[in-house]
Amino acid sequence: MDAALGPPEKLATRADELTPMLSQYFELCTEYEDSLVLFQVGDFYEAFCEAAERVSRLCEITLTKREDSTGEYPMAGIPVDNAESYIETLLDAGYRVAVADQVQDPDEATGVVDRAVTRIVTPGTLTEDELLRTDDNNFVACLARDGDRFGLALLDVSTGDCFVTSTADESALADELGRFAPAEAVVGPDAPTAPFDSDCMVTPHDTAAFEGENARELVASYFGDPETVLAGDCEVRACGALLDYAEYTRGSEGDDAAGERGRLDYLNHVTRYDPREYLLLDRVALDSLELFDRRAIHGRAAATVVEVLDETACALGSRELKDWLRRPLIERGRIEARHDAVGELAADVRTRERLHEQLRDVYDVERLISRVSRARANARDLRSLKDTLDVVPEVEAALEGAQCDALREIRDDLDDLGEIRDLIGRAIRDEPPIEVTEGGVIAAGYDDRLDDLRETERDGKAWIDSLEETERERTGIDSLKVGHNAVHGYYIEVTNPNLDAVPDDYTRRQTLKNAERFYTPELKAREDEIIQAEQRADDLEYDLFREVRDTVAAESERVQALADTLARLDVLVSFATVAAEYDYARPTIVDEPKRTAIEGGRHPVVERTQSSFVPNDADLDAESFFAVITGPNMSGKSTYMRQVALIQLLAQAGSFVPAADARLSLVDRVFTRVGASDDIAGGKSTFMVEMTELAEILENATDRSLILLDEVGRGTSTTDGLAIARAVTEHVHDEIGARTLFATHHHELTATAEALPAAFNCHFSAEQDGQTVSFDHEIRQGPAAASYGVQVARESGVPDTVVDRSRELLDAHDQENSSYEGVNSHEGNNTRNGQSTAAASNDAETGSDGDASTDENELATIIREQNLATTTPMDALALLQDLQERIEE
Ligand code: ADP
């Protein structure tokens, strides 16, 4: 990505001698040096020189050239009418695009036409419907630093959603960025660049915008006193700089813009929050629970959690649902209020379905009102707003009998903006055209002046309609015709044989092969009258339309509040629909510490994507909160762990849960270390990623957290891995005391679990039937049988001698393992059920200390000294090749 372009060199070297037009282009490129400038020339947006070459390559359009007296310049143009799809390509390639429009009528220009950048399109500040996903927010983030505190502001320019928070903890900062997944991050002086996702564009912005005084003023002009709406200098600076950047990208857009920098008038509310007010989910957790994105590994996820939960009826609700899942609550009262509403709607099919139908008629008024405020909305948008407002009283009626607080609150919050609805209803025609300057927009009866003009127009046209008849009578020419064409206007047409009968007041307008066309002074006068009336009416309509639009814009805050209320309702209805259709249960929130009591829990996605699903229980409490889960691959361990976490998360988001029953105490955070998320592209080894994630968990988890660990210590040697797994288990158990589910293939860990008072074993098993292994996916108490693999080997026909030897080695291993108990400081039941610990016979083969040659020692040293923590998969391959070469020498 090479976003910084600067002005083309070729132009820079000849800056003095350029033609006025190219000189104007050059200046705009200099002013907007970090953007690719698209420069309107008539029906095309042109780029020149280096920029032309890139646009041509990326957008696959022909590279042409412009020739003038000063030379030849490469040029590439994209059609103005169809620019958005090309702009999207340029954005995807990592560019910001500055759109320079002609802001002067070319006919009125003396010399070169005035052009101005009317908008800068960047990934984080999009408002073009064509470029946005309707069902998700699109955030731009801004970071400012104040000592060791970071202020973080987030804004969705298309909807006006604005959030601000701050933290002194860089990992908490990364978590927030993970949650909101901004498409772009604006950074100021000494802000960190580290915690951004790789597909987030990092945009440095004017240092002055981050300065305290400037930021304070801008924040105050949008949201009121910064001291009351925000907390601390770094928040004000982040928020101020973000507003500044958003205005900068708005340019001077809108169909009635006066060329000044765009204020975002619809932005009038900021949500200041503390990350600790929500259940914390970092990027790793969001990813591994497959909440919003499918993970590539195992190719397993057929759907995401949000996909199976989304029964919302409108775009507002669909976005709100994601917000609720991204930020589940930690306040019991608020959570239970949502559960009450879901319960009430789940039990009442009629109301639920009625609301769902009504909400389907709700437009994306959040984005619509932002277009209204930016003077980019057309008459159809206003009609759509009215259609939505029409629904409001119906929704209110449907909620009439609402019992619970949450639904009553929604009912009371509903605001049908009666006067706005009436205004649009009276002023705007039913099916107006997209163009707002060519008439046909304002309804009859709304404005007397307009009605008069339209009447003049109609009278004139009626007179003309009757003209044919009158003139035929007057002249006696039966074939006389009255017509109209775009070039010559109205005419009276007489065929050549009848030309003798033409009266004196006819003036010739046009000669055809077989006829002549005429006009009369009266026809001309009427025609002028019609044209004038039409022109004045169109202009008046546009003025009236803008008045209406401005009146609506002045109520943007109320429209946004309405959007928010409808969005909440839509999510609750969606939760209720899922609960009723898929047999979810209302979770009970309890105050007992570390309580997770799930009966018949299911994984919300897996249960939908396969024909049968085996429900499982979970039972954790203060005395017994650490589960070590063993069992063969594919037996269901990770599905089980995720379902426990998802049930917790859904409950705290306010949803019912896929289980027969669930009693849960709240958690402050869900941590996951699941699966081998090998970041090969990022150049990190599996082990390194694993340890980084682990360190994060150990540092931040509390006794109110829920931790999922899957196969910790797999990326290194067995001894190493086991040691780490044991140490982690002890630490989490003794020091942190967090509810934990730990799936492992280290069978030795089951002994550790038995040794720790609040840890316990459970397992999944497999059955062998002839050649096939089958799983019953049922969780059971106690550890899995260690000899599982050996049994499978025997049943699969591996020779007895090999099987016996395997068992011998396994027993020896157990023996070795029991030494752990000797150094274990914990009291507990250390025997492993049903496991033989018979001493192993001599097993010289297991050691490698034979009479190895010096060569082998050398190889061993190389391997031993390799630091696996920093070895990437590519390094490992290179090392292997090196070793191979040494052996062959
Ligand atoms: P493991 O983590 O033990 O390797 P998984 O949890 O990945 O196993 O499960 C493997 C597959 O088994 C899943 O993809 C799913 O299709 C199926 N499965 C898991 N749990 C269940 C269950 N409770 N009921 C039915 N099928 C299940």
Image (tube, rainbow, N blue to C red):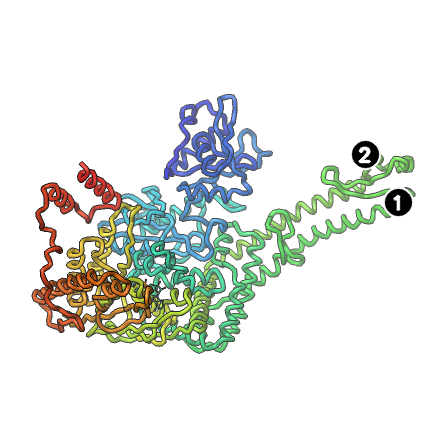
Near mark 1 (Cα within 10 A), the count class, few <14, some 14-19 or many ≥20, is some
Q: In this view, does 330 lie to the left or right of 30?
A: left
Q: Name the residue under label 1.
A: 472
Q: In which quarter of the image is residue 805?
A: bottom left
Rendering coords of residue 178 (x, y %): 32, 55
- Point out the image quarter for the C terminus: top left
User: Spatial distance from mark 1 to mark 2, Cα to Cα?
Assistant: 20 Å
Q: Viewer-proximal residue, 749 or 451?
A: 749
Q: Is mark 2 within 8 Å of ligand 1?
A: no
Considering only order in the chain, which callout, 2 or 1, is on the residue closer to the N terminus?
Answer: 1
Query: What amino acid type should be assigned to the residue bearing mark 1?
Result: Arg
Rendered image quadrant of residue 344:
bottom left
- Residue 191 in view: no
Can residue 737 be seen in this snapshot? yes
Q: Which numbered marker is on residue 524? A: none
Towards the viewer: 95 or 371:
95
Q: Compared to 746, does 151 lie above or below?
A: above
- In the image, what residue type sits under mark 2? Leu
Placement of 462 over or under 315, stated as above or below: above
Label 1: which secondary element:
helix
Query: Residue 398's spot in the image, x, y percent?
Result: 52, 73
- Count of numbered tags: 2
Identify the residue at image location x=48%, y=77%. 348
Residue 512's disc is 2
